[in-house]
Image (tube, rainbow, N blue to C red):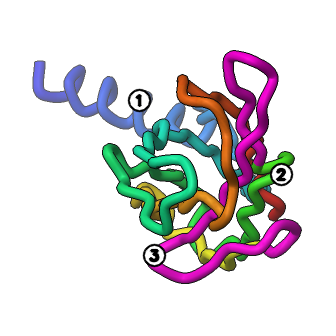
């Protein structure tokens, strides 16, 4: 019996070099991504109170422009529009805008730098240009906010 076990072990050992194992091959690949610059913008309305012919304009509700850009993306925020409000009888009232208390002339952009998930809030104010005498009533105008990046 011992002899048969020995023969069996020798037979199996002799066959081992014949048993074929699967070969392996390998390769690697790169993963690339292009992150594109992007910006989004939202706004909130601005409300003023003005007495015709008076020098003072009272801000009832300040407005804001909120900009979110990809991290490190430089951008310019512009407010495009006539900056003129139209009243009930067709009268017009001209306003001057400001950002953070500084005058914001038409055609001039405010520079911002994207901070990724952080929203940049630009406070927007306005004053009625002095010396205008208009009829009482509600005056409305619309400005377009444009972000160039």
In which quadrant of the rendered view does residue 76 lie? bottom right
* 90 inside magenta stretch: yes
Question: How far is disc 1 from disc 2 in space, using C-alphas?
Answer: 88 Å
Marks 1 and 3 in Cβ contact (< 8 Å): no
Question: How far is disc 1 from disc 3 in space, using C-alphas?
Answer: 88 Å
What is the x, y in percent for residue 73? 69, 71
Q: How many marks?
A: 3
Secondary structure of the residue carrying tag 1 is: helix
In which quadrant of the rendered view does residue 127 lie? bottom right
Report whether 119 appears left or right of 87: left
Determine which residue is flagged by label 3. 100
Q: Residues within 10 Å of mark 2 (few under 14, many from 20)?
A: some
Determine which residue is flagged by label 1. 12
Secondary structure of the residue carrying tag 3 is: loop
Determine which residue is flagged by label 2. 80
* 50 inside magenta stretch: no
At 47% from the left and 43% from the top, the residue drawn is: 46
At 49% from the left and 68% from the top, the residue drawn is: 55
Say which quadrant the N terminus sits in: top left
Q: Which residues are magenta?
A: 84-108
Secondary structure of the residue carrying tag 2 is: strand
């Amino acid at each position: 019996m011992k002899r048969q076990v020995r023969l069996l072990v020798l037979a199996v050992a002799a066959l081992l070099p014949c048993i074929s194992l699967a070969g392996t091959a390998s390769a690697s690949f790169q993963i690339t991504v292009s992150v594109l610059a992007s910006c989004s913008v939202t706004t909130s309305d601005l409300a003023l109170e003005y007495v015709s012919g008076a020098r003072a304009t009272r801000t009832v509700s300040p407005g804001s422009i909120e900009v979110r850009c990809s991290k490190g993306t430089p951008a310019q925020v512009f407010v495009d529009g006539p900056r003129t409000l139209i009243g009930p009888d067709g009268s017009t009232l001209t306003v001057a805008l400001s950002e953070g208390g500084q005058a914001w002339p038409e055609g001039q952009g405010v520079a911002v730098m994207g901070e990724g998930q952080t929203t940049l809030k630009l406070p927007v104010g306005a004053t009625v240009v002095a010396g205008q005498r208009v009829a009482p009533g509600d005056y409305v105008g619309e400005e377009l906010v444009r972000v160039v990046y």
